[in-house]
Image (cartoon, rainbow, N blue to C red):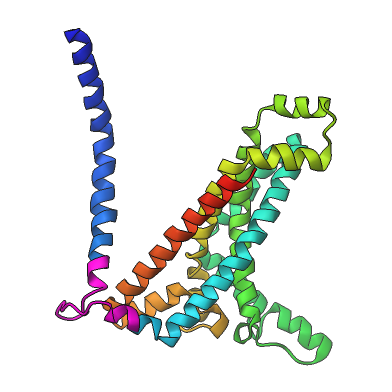
Amino acid sequence: MERKQRRGFGQMWIFWAFLLPNLLGVLIFTLVPMLRVLLSSFQTAVGGHWVGFQNYATVLQNSAFRLAVANTTRFTLICIPILLVISLGLALGLRALPGIGVRLRSAFLMPMAVPAASVVLVWKVLFHEQGLLNGILISITGEGVRWMDTDASFWMLVISYLWRNLGYTTVLWTAGLAAIPESIYEAARVDGAQGWQVLRYITLPSLKGTGYTIDVLSLLNSFKVFREAWLVEGDYPQQSMYLMQHLYNNWFRELDFDKIAAASVMTSLVVFVLIGLLGKAWDKKE
C-alpha cells in the first residue's frame, strides 16, 4: 500500500514538474500583463490617477475608434465565411484526389512562408499608380486608377488575407477529414446514401471539432492583418483599410496608453464573447 502511494506521489511530482514551467510562463507573460492592462484602463496615462470608466467613454466617442471597429468587423464578417467555404471545398477536392492531394498539401502552406514584405512588393508592382495594372489600363483606355486611394484597397486586403490563410486552413480541414473513419462512409453507402447526403449527414457533423478550431483561429488571425496594410500605406491608409491595429499603433506612438488599455479590454471581451458564441453554435449543430 505504501509503495503504491509513493508511486502515485512520484507520478504527481513528475506531472507538476513538466506542467509548472508552462504555468509560470502563462502567468508571467500573459495573465500578469492582462491584469496590468485592465488596471491601466481605469487610470490616466500620466501619474496613474484613478478615473473609473472615463477612458472607456473617451474611446467610445473617438471617431477613429469607431471607424477602426467598423472596418475590422466588416473585414471579419467577409473574410471568415469565404475562407471557410473555399478551404473546405479544396479539402474535399484533395480527398477525392489522394495521389495528387498529398503533393499539393505542402504547396498550400507556401503563402505562410512568404515574408510580408515580399507580398507588399507584389502589391506595389500590381496596384501602384504606375504599376502593372495601371499600365494595362492606360494602354487600353488612356487613363489609370489610383487603386490604393479607393475602396478597392479594402478588397485587396481581403484577397491578401485569403491568399495567406487559405492553404493553412485547407490543411486543417484535410486533417479533420482524415480522422473520420472510413467504415462510417461504407455503412452509409450500404444504406444508400450518396453525394450530398453523405456530406450533410456524415462529413459535416464529423467535422464539428475541427470546424470550431478553424473558426477560432480564423477569427484571431483576422485581427492580425496589419503588416501588409501598414507596409503599403503607412500609419494612415485609405479610410476603408484603417483597422484596429492601425489605431493601436498610432495611439502607442502618441503615448495614449490609457486609451490603448481601454480599447484592448473591450476588444478582448468581444473576442471572448465571439469565441463562446461560436462554441455554442457548433454544439447546437446536428
Q: Seen from this angle, which residue lies furthest bottom?
A: 142
Q: Is residue 76 left or right of residue 192?
A: left
Name which quarter of the figure residue 47 lies in.
Answer: bottom left
- Residue 181 figure quarter: top right
Q: Residue 61: x, y in percent?
A: 39, 86
Between 80 and 191, the residue placed more toward the observer is: 191
Q: Which residues are magenta?
A: 38-57
Q: Main secondary structure of the magenta part?
A: loop
Q: Quadrant of the N terminus?
A: top left
Please state if 251 lies on the left or on the right of 148 as rendered. left
Position of residue 239 in the picture relative to residue 134 (left or right): left
Q: Is residue 255 visible?
A: no
Q: Is 54 colored magenta in this rendering?
A: yes
201 drawn magenta:
no
Q: Residue 157 at what x, y percent from top left?
A: 59, 71
The residue at 28%/77% (across/down) is: 53
Quadrant of the image for the C terminus?
top right
**In front of the other: 251 or 66:** 66
At a point 73% along the width and 39% down the height, the residue shown is 201
Q: Is residue 166 above or below residue 2?
A: below
